[in-house]
């Protein structure tokens, strides 16, 4: 999404999980994808290379204070990820038990509510402008569009929508606008893998 937005030509290489990944996994740094390759140099850890790309494309704000606020938004992903996997992608029979799934869902929604409320408060302090930090798009807006807009108001809509709209009504509107306007061309392109989120 960042490369497309920055009008940087790229090739999205899709690895078949069943036929290609088993052999490739041992050769991939840290043993998982995605990775970014630029001129033969491989970058691992999507959190790190998203920041790298954002800096190269001027999407990390105007100063160190903006960079702090952007990194704070991105860090919310790690706060939510363990809950996301247990609720949306339970990996074992224990996690699939109705009572366990119910407890995990309640814990996830409580965490989601607290994070969205905190982000909503920061967005208000920033003036509830066109973008999260004001008048210029930053990497924080990519996270908001991707996580809140595409996942929680998309795939996870039935479970998450009321929590997000209650805890962060302005943030929800921002996420929807980013998806409908700023990232529309990417989401309608062949580069976006439909159903991947």
Image (cartoon, rainbow, N blue to C red):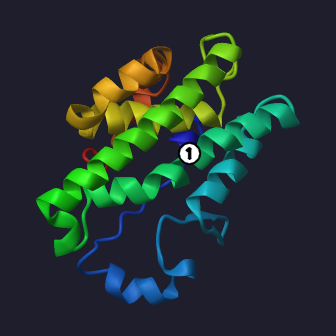
Residue 125 position in % (x across, y down): 70, 16
Residue name at image x 47 percent, y 68 percent: 33
Residue 74 position in % (x across, y down): 60, 44
- The answer to which of 32 and 56 lies nearer the viewer is 32
Residue name at image x 43 percent, y 83 percent: 25
| Residue 48 in view of the camera | yes
Give the quarter of the image for residue 119. Answer: top right
Residue name at image x 40 percent, y 40 percent: 110
Q: Residue furthest left?
A: 98
- The answer to which of 45 and 189 lies nearer the viewer is 45
Residue at numbered disc 1: 76
| Residue 58 in view of the camera | no
- The answer to which of 48 and 5 lies nearer the viewer is 48
Residue 108 position in % (x across, y down): 36, 47
- The answer to which of 22 and 40 lies nearer the viewer is 22
Give the quarter of the image for residue 175. Answer: top left
């Amino acid at each position: 999404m960042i490369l497309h937005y920055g009008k940087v030509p790229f090739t999205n290489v899709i690895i078949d999980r069943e036929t290609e990944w088993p052999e490739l996994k041992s050769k991939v740094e840290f043993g998982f994808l995605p990775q970014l390759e630029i001129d033969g140099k491989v970058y691992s850890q999507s959190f790190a290379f998203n920041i790298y790309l954002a800096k190269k494309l001027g999407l990390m704000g105007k100063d160190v204070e903006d960079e702090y606020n952007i990194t704070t938004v991105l860090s919310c992903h790690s706060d939510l990820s363990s809950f996301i996997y247990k609720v949306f992608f339970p990996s074992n029979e224990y996690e699939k038990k109705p009572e366990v799934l119910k407890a995990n869902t309640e814990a996830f929604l409580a965490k989601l509510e607290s994070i969205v409320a905190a982000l909503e408060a920061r967005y208000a302090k920033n003036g509830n402008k066109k973008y999260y930090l004001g008048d210029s798009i930053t990497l924080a807006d990519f996270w908001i569009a991707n996580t809140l807009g595409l996942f929680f108001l998309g795939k996870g809509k039935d479970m998450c929508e009321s929590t997000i709209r209650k805890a962060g009504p302005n943030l929800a509107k921002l996420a929807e606008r980013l998806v409908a306007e700023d990232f529309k061309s990417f989401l309608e392109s062949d580069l976006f893998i439909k159903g991947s989120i």
